[in-house]
Image: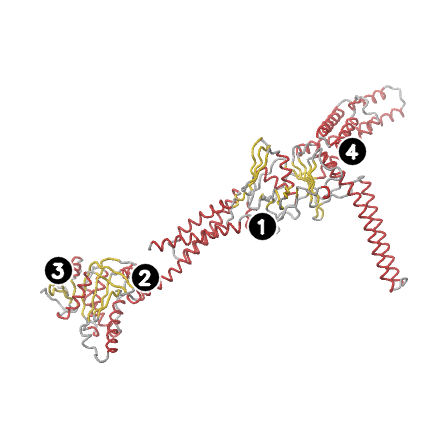
Amino acid sequence: MPKKRSLIRLLLPLLAGIFFVLLGVYLLLGPRLGPHYDFLLKKRPAPAIAPGLMLIDTGRTNGLENFLDPMTLIAAMECTAELGAASVLVQAPVLGMSAGGAENAGELLLRFEDEFSRVKENIDSLFTAILTGSVDPADTGSYVTSLLFLVDRSKDRLLSDLYRNGRIGSEQISQAAEAYGPVWFARDFQASLFRPGEGDSSGAGEAADYPGNPWYFRVPPDPDGTVRRIPPVLYSGEEEREYIAFAAVKEMLRPSAAGRDEWGMVLRGVSLPGKTGSDLFIPLDETGAVLIPILPEGAVFPRIGLSELIRYAELDRELYRILTEMQQLGYFRSLEPEQYPVFLYDFALDARNSLLISKDPADRGEWVLLREQYLEGLKFFFSGPAESDLVNGYEEIIGSGELDEAGIAQLGEFRDDLIAVFAGARNLFEEFSSLRESLAVRLSGAFCVFGAPASGGHPENGAGPVNPSDTEASLLFANTVITGQGPVPVQWPELAFWSLIPVILCALLVWRCGPWLSLFLGIVFSTVAGIVFSYIFIYSGRWIDPLVPAAGVFAAAAAAAVLGLILKRRDRSLFRRAYGPYVSGKILRRIVRAGRPEPSETITLDAVIVAVRFPDLFSRESRDNPSASAGMVRGYRDTVSRILKDAGAAMVGSDGDLVLAAFGSPLDRQHSRAGKGARPELPPENHSAAEGTKKKHGKHIRKISDSLEKALRTAADISENDEARSWYFGIDAGECAFMYSEAFGYAAFGHPVVRARLLSSIAYRYESRVLISDTVYDRLSRQNAFAGDTPAIRKLDTMTERISGKEEEFFGIFPGGPAGDT
């Protein structure tokens, strides 16, 4: 294959593959994630969950996230602050009616019932009046208008009450969040941060109070509606808004500095478990977002039900109520006043109230310390001698004999009541202590997010992913940032580099293959490339879109196939034009299929030259009718060419009555590599003569080269043909140069061509019409081609070369019996 063609067949598929890789990088990099990414993401191992992440599950009802009562939320935040939570995100909807607690809630409920009962009463009265005929039908429209006006007035009154109570609720939430912070509070499309000692006491959290709010929490989905990534920072012109979970994570990790480049974001000097002062790299995709994983079915974030926090607050209040009753009954008489549990609780409550006013972190520490002292006092009280001292006192009085039976019975009841009260209080304290211990272990240093997981569970295989709720998105983001185990998007140089490797390998493998094999290999290699890069993503997390290398590989193979078809079609046309007139159709098809030899090649090799001459041709031509002469010459040449081409020869020239053919030419050699050459096909009426000739000569000629055998058999067969009795043959063998030129067609050059021509021109002088050179005779002798002592070949004469004076013998082939040398 010429170097130029080889270079084209290598470079064109390679360039096509490179183009499609770059096109894929442009089209598929960054935001363009789709179902194949979702499918592979579900196959990844479950990511490790960072210690400290905690979901405070607020639950759902009928698929809708439950609203939080403000007092419930405040009690839950108080619990997380007391037990040492590091950060709190509130991403659950909160009702705007928290002022006054249950009393205001009951009042609003009564207001709703009152207003709607009035509306119902008015509607019923109108329809009753219409049915009884008390209202003229002509006046119905005015009555309906009045009724609608009354409904609007009711709505305005309710909205006014809701706004007033909601405003008060927001103020209390703001106050608690600032005291128990850091708390990030998401409200509709606003997100507000409350830190101890900071914030706007005039109603923090309202949009009007935070016009330049730098946080957001609603994750923008991809164009198909699926949440796959979360930008740590949203940019809108010169405005920057951080994701609320990112702000909370930074607050928890406390980096000394934060920077960003085109590859990702770096938090320097963060505080991680076991690592202090290390740098944390956050890889970002082309959109500047973090790719978040999905949790497989059955895998969940650690969670605490909101009911557990509420139960903790309820147990705390209930225990305080019982302790207050016990104090009134004198159960603390054995304790010093500073050890009274109720006094310790009141001290802690006063510290909490001071904290709500000051929002000072120092006051928060004092409050937590007083709460611990209160619990230690309770433990000392229930484990100490207080109960036994009181019971023993009753027992001493009963056993003193100073009381009558009625007094003893009454005192026994007092003793039993005391034991029952202590047992109930102790059980309540044990439940409270057990719950506190469990919550403290889980909440200490925790990153807490209030909200509900997504409804609907996990999708079935093949279905699209269920989007995470805002709460789960925050946890997934925080977990990905802290653990670094999320999907890692590669940047375009890396994507292009790794995608080009299989493209180059494919181009090197298919450039010598045929079109259909190239296409088949392209399908196989592109599939393999897609599978390999899919597994790379599954097991390493590096997202190199498998479609990019797969498309590049297939494009390279398809380009090789298309180019092969084009070159094959071109070669077929070129070979048919170049070799079609000189070989048989069977040989031509084999040459076209093999694609060689190239018409531009000059090939030198050993071949057998057969020259056929028809001396009587021009003696038969008509001087008065040149067209008839031309037709006669054409008929002669066509007949000779057909017979020789059918025998497997290549026509290498003609001149007047001379026709030259070569056996063993590059064209014949190509055909012989694919299959055996054909025997000469003579007209049907001459088949019997040809078979007879084959029988006569076949026993004398054996074990010779295929080309020489075909040449001798063909010449012998033609010489026995009645139509060819005036044809004379000259045969020589040796090195010849073969070439094609558009000027003179396919031709052979060399001394064997000259000698074959000469032998054919003098053959009419001898009895034999087939003359062979001494070279042919020597080859027949060396190959022991004679079957017996009396071959059908004999020496005829000697030729002398003019320039060198070298004498060369030539021989004749006779169809008859034995003949001796002359």
Q: Nearer the viewer, mark 2 or mark 3?
A: 3
Q: Secondary structure at mark 3?
A: loop
- Check disc 3 and report the residue beneath it: 803
Query: Observer-nearest residue: 324 or 260?
Result: 260
Q: Is residue 391 left or right of residue 368?
A: right
Measured in 3D between alpha carbons, the distance from the residue under mark 1 to the one under mark 4, in whole angstroms, is 49 Å
Measured in 3D between alpha carbons, the distance from the residue under mark 4 to the one under mark 2, in whole angstroms, is 102 Å
Measured in 3D between alpha carbons, the distance from the residue under mark 1 to the one under mark 3, in whole angstroms, is 92 Å
- Check disc 1 and report the residue beneath it: 461
- Residue pushed farthest bottom? 624
Residue type, label 3: Ile
Q: Position of residue 569 (x, y in %)?
A: 38, 62
Q: Earlier in the sequence, mark 4 or mark 2?
A: 4
| Image quadrant occupied by the C terminus | bottom left
- Check disc 2 and report the residue beneath it: 591
- Circles 2 and 1: CB atoms closer than 8 Å: no
Q: Which mark is residue 521?
A: none
Vertical placement of residue 87 versus 594, above or below: above
Q: Nearer the viewer, mark 4 or mark 3?
A: 3
Q: Secondary structure at mark 2?
A: helix
Residue type, label 4: Glu
Q: Position of residue 609 (x, y in %)?
A: 21, 63
Q: Earlier in the sequence, mark 2 or mark 3?
A: 2
- Check disc 4 and report the residue beneath it: 318
Residue type, label 1: Asn
